[in-house]
Image (spheres, rainbow, N blue to C red):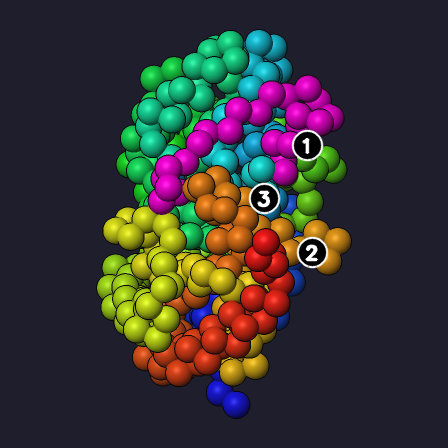
Amino acid sequence: MTVAYLDHAATTPVVPEAIAAVTAAMVEVGNPQSLHGAGRWARALVEESRERVAAALGARPGDVIFTAGGTESDNLAVKGGYWARRAADPARVRLVISAVEHHAVLDAAAWLAAEQGAQVTLVEVDAWGRVRPEALERALHADGGPATVALVSIMWANNEVGTVNDIATLAAVAHEHGVPMHSDAVQAVGQLPVDMTAAGVDALTLSGHKLGGPPGSGALLVQRELGLQPLLHGGASEREARAGTLDVPGIAGLAAATVLAVREQSQRAARLVALRDELVDAVTDACPEAVLNGDPHTRLPGNAHLGFPGCEGDALLLLLDAAGVHCSTGSACTAGVAQPSHVLLAMGATPEAARGSLRFSLGHTSTAADVRAVADAIGPAVARARRAGLLHAPRPR
Ligand code: PLP
């Protein structure tokens, strides 16, 4: 059976350029911290990669800290940024983050609250999942005001519903109040133009496996002025912010994929928008009651997030999987029970609507045949899921 892979937001195939860069680095030997020739070769490759990643994203080479992916970068920004700011000014006990952040940000902040007395203020989003500047203003002025805030963290684009924030405006609001701003740009890099300096953010997260690079690679781009305390101890690597022997092949692969994704961003986006719109039309033709979630205008080019009233998303996902269509639900499983997505709940969806949603995400290998596979499979899958969904519906009184 041919498979239509429509889960690029979960992970996307590694591009040949990154495979070549990883392979070329893997057949060599050298620890960038060694002083001999092999070490100097590895160090040169790391520094060249650092320059390429920085140039692609409007950062300075010295801003780039290589990590093992988006989760680590988010943790380093939130915890490391919080610790550094609080150490410099003990009044700064608050983190201001949006209610729809990825769990790598939400859970890092929750851990700081539970273990270290941090206060977390969630910025509300509107019905399309956007963080409005007024909402950020309100959150900064809550609970003791901006002078108590260590860091703002607001994602560039949402991984579930695809809504894109106006990051430059939000960063300006944070800066007006003297608060630094981190943005998780894991889903944005390669899909949207991302320039750290133009947007005015102080720290930015990227992840290799979301943009065609190797899984387990990533970076936190962070201005030196922000100050950061390390999560990992054990050596003065990555300007003392991240200990550990560097993954030279992973770093080379990340740089190759980032450069390519940024270079091809605008053509890729135009192609994906056309395919994505065809997919949405095909789904709504087959199921007129399906609704597009998220911002209908300013959304990630490859994202189609749809609600199917009366269906369980997980049932629908398995039915589509059996038909060779791979997509995802935003629900997380806790103790075997599907929990509705925190993103959709924050946007005002009911738990039932939140559980009946699917994300189709397109990427660099997506084709018109993938869209046709969805068009063929979705009608029968929704009909079956709805029959099954009704079994679980409350009995009429
Ligand atoms: N942030 C966002 C917005 C994501 O979508 C993801 C992955 O799903 C992450 C962070 C975590 O990145 P990684 O898988 O590289 O740890």
> What residue did someone put label 3 on?
103
State the residue position of label 1: 111
State the residue at coordinates (37%, 21%). 137
Q: Is residue 7 visible in the rendered structure shown here?
A: yes
Residue found at x 37% / y 78%: 375
Q: Which of the pair 282/123 is nearer the observer?
A: 282
Mark 1 nearby-residue class (10 Å; few <14, some 14–19, many ≥20): some
Judged left or right of residue 88, residue 301 is left
Decide: is 57 above or below 29: above
Q: For the residues marked 3 and 1, what is the alpha-carbon distance in whole angstroms? A: 11 Å
The residues bearing labels 2 and 1 have C-alpha atoms spaced at a distance of 23 Å
Number of numbered tags placed on the structure image: 3
**For residue 111, above or below residue 368:** above
Mark 2 Cα shell of 10 Å, populated few (<14), some (14-19), many (≥20): few
| Quadrant (top left, top right, bottom left, bottom right) of the C terminus | bottom right
Q: CA distance from mark 3 to mark 2?
A: 18 Å
* Between 65 and 206, the one nearer to me in the picture: 206
Q: Report the span colored magenta.
A: 107-130
Residue pointed to by mark 2:
337
Where disc 2 sits, the SS reads strand
Q: Quadrant of residue 211?
A: bottom left
Label 2 beta carbon less than 8 Å to ligand 1: no
Look at 67% across and 40% down and name the residue there.
243
Q: At label 3, which amino acid type do we have?
A: His
